[in-house]
Image (cartoon, rainbow, N blue to C red):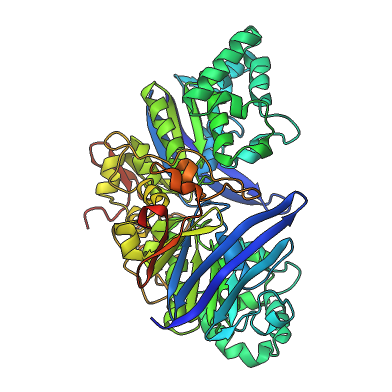
Amino acid sequence: MMVLENVTKIYRIGTFGGKRLKAVDDVSFEIDEGEIVSLIGESGSGKTTIGKMILRLIRPTSGRILFNGKDIGQFKKNELKDYYRKVQGVFQDPFSSYNPLYKVDRIFDIAREEFFPDVGRNEWKNRIEEKLRSVGLNPLEVLGKFPHQLSGGQLQRLLIARALVMNVRFLVADEIISMLDASTRIDVLNLLAELKDSGLSILFITHDLSLGYYISDKTVILYRGSIMEYGDTEKIFNSPAHPYTISLMESIPRIDERWRMRSAVIQGKEKSIRNGRMCKFYHRCFKGDESCVEPPLIEVEKDHFVRCSKIGT
Amino acid sequence: MKVSLRVENLRIYYRTLRGYVKAVDGVSFEMGDEEVLGVAGESGCGKSTLGNSLILLKPPMTYMEGRVFLDGEEVPIWDNEKMRRFRYRRISIIPQYAMNALNPTKKLKVLMDDLLREHGSDFKSHTAEILRRLKMVNLPESVLNMYPIELSGGMKQRMVMVISTLMNPSLLIADEITSALDVSTQKAVIEMLMEFKSRGFVRKIFFITHDISVLYQIASSILVMYAGKLVEKASTDEILEKPFHPYTEMLISSLPKIGIKYGERKLKGIPGQPPPLLKPPEGCRFKDRCPYRHSKCDEEPPIVEISDDRVVSCWKYA
């Protein structure tokens, strides 16, 4: 359904844009219909940039993104509008998605004016109420309110409801539950899983591995713009192969197993090789040596890809 | 357990135009020497207010009643002037959003010098120790001549950790210090904090977070707050194995764990929302979301001592 082909994004940074930063580096993966794919990485790994490129908020420097076989970069007016009718995003901070001067209903009004001007007011209202109930909200409690009168969880569910009212087919969910409390985040997560069962595809961007494990079919582990490991969620969590993934798994705080704390505060030896072609994880890797040059993404088992030169050693 | 922090019936309210918001409403607990006490709860439960009140009452925070004792001495938290003697030297804090807690216009060296002079010392007399500690948290000496803006988020976090603990305080309040970090950085920061503690740079840590799984790694006991009240306090193993309060129980069972997938076992959240603290309901504050609610719950629940170091505030155990 959504296919990323060798997508790269280079930002110009610095005062006069003189420096370049490769935020996303030759990333390819795909999301099928009714599938949830977790995109996991630390801050600065490029995960949000990928989400924004899918939403066409920014353009890739090179590579293509295909939606149902068509390059989204080529979309003009009507095609683009049609694309946004099917593909929408929900972001981390629900408060910033609303204009505090208007009632929350406005997010639905704008969607109708913009995308569904032919739908009658009453029919639209019915649709909204139906979808609000499906995300676990009581329409009477939330409609007609200002954003500050509602909780983060309610606002976030309203935004998901908006995507449902529009009947989108693909949702970019960028850290949508990291600002919610433990007692409500699981409900939003369950909601996403239910929507998937009804055919919605979701790109679930997160830095929280246990949330990703809970709902996703496939997992992409991103490090400094490159895919380090990719494949079936079960396989990645049960038999992580990349040293980065392994270190992530060991760092997850669990409530059934305690961390092995390292007493030595300084971690990782200083590594001397400074070569742009080295594996990006080389400087933090416990296995890395001079042979770690541009490792390719290799299939270690069915539906499980790893970018590491030390596989099997 | 040698008690070294005792808080008795503490009430800290926020003064607003519409009345008092009862953010911390009659909280009592004890903390042992060299203990890491975890404080858990949802946003708005009063956990940060509780932590902050032990060091600085910023308006509109208002002291209503209660007493605090640290190492046998009363801490006059209601008296801003008298608190100067405790602040930084004996009670210190790594605030939430520590990354933004540094004055951007000063080099870190100058910033530290100002702070130390404020407390009757200076940078010079601490230089050797500062360099030693910077090395421990993996920061180069050159950061001292940098401005905060030149440091990355993780570097700033480590810098604040060094600054906050420089006077070897008895009590360190760590307020959501790892919440904005990804898992590997989170683990590294916590390892450093524990290293600081084992070297005696801080004696005990009041670790505030919404993430119970982080507390499981480091805390010896956990205090759970809900809507301004302490609902349960017990040793970490006991509380996770057998939570007594219905809120704690539901909170822990809602946590996603590796090994649990939606398709196999569906986790449940807690329906409803915490009550408004401007006018909290009579009796138990969790009653509206509680599956065990009965008529007794309209009365203030007693604080039941289950054992020596375990208390729960619920009618179920009265």
Q: Is residue A96 above or below residue A107?
A: below
Q: Which residue is pictured at 49% across the width and 41% down the height?
A: B288
Rendering coords of residue B165 (x, y %): 56, 79
Quadrant of the image occupied by residue B197? bottom left
Check the picture and name the quadrant holding the N terminus of chain B: bottom left
Rendering coords of residue A163 (x, y %): 54, 24
- Left or right position of A100 against B12: right
- Left or right position of A66 against B166: left
Q: Is residue B144 visible?
A: yes
Q: Which residue is pictured at 70% across the width and 63% down the height?
A: B61
Quadrant of the image occupied by residue A281? bottom left
Residue furthest toward the bottom?
Answer: B125
Q: Is residue A286 visible?
A: no
Rendering coords of residue A86 (x, y %): 52, 20
Q: Is residue A255 above or below residue A76?
A: below
Check the picture and name the quadrant holding the C terminus of chain B: bottom left
- Left or right position of A89 against B248: right
In terms of depth relative to the viewer, which is nearer, B202 or A248?
B202
In terms of depth relative to the viewer, which is nearer, B148 or A73?
B148
Q: Is residue A267 above or below residue B314?
A: below
In terms of depth relative to the viewer, which is nearer, B12 or A200?
B12
Rendering coords of residue A106 (x, y %): 68, 25
- Left or right position of A90 against A278: right
Count of marks, rendered view: 0
Q: Is residue B217 above or below residue A40?
A: below
Q: Which residue is pictured at 63% across the width and 22% down the height?
A: A108
Quadrant of the image occupied by residue B150? bottom right
